Image (tube, helix red, strand yellow):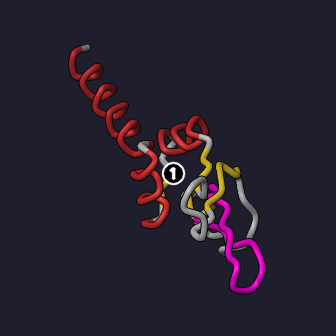
Amino acid sequence: MGAVIRLSRMGAVHEPVYRIIVADSRFVRAGRALDKIGHYDQRRKDAGIVISEEKALKWLKLGATPSPRVKGIFKKQGIWKKFMEAGKAGASAKAGA
């Protein structure tokens, strides 16, 4: 099973709001989610992105692949940088052992 972190569209017509979910890659866009880790409202500039950083890092460490849009959101929030730094720290610790 390949886990994917992606957006699931919610909201009314012409007023989209997206949930950031972790799903099995075989599920459809609006299908069942394994976990809900946040939401994204592209129409709001101030607080349109809310993500549980703890859950996002947990799923990334477990091997979930973010979609290109979600990866961009993670970069904007600094989550991707923390994930990459944790990966480098883990790799150097393994090399030193």
Residue 82 at x, y = what percent?
39, 36
Residue 75 at x, y = what percent?
39, 51
Residue 26 picture quarter: bottom right
- Quick one: label 1, few (<14), some, or many (20+) residues within 10 Å? many
Residue 4 picture quarter: bottom right
Residue 62 at x, y = what percent?
52, 41
Q: Residue at x 46, y 66 (%)?
A: 69
Residue lying at the far bottom in this picture: please name it. Answer: 13
Q: Which residues are magenta?
A: 7-23
Residue 19 at x, y = what percent?
67, 61
Q: Main secondary structure of the magenta part?
A: strand
Q: Residue at x 28, y 19 (%)?
A: 93
- Left or right of 86 in this view: 22: right
Q: Tell me the element at label 1.
A: loop
The residue that disc 1 covers is 64
- Left or right of 31 in this view: 48: left
When the figure is inspected, residue 92 is found, relative to residue 4, above or below; the finding is: above
Q: What amino acid type should be assigned to the residue bearing mark 1? A: Ala
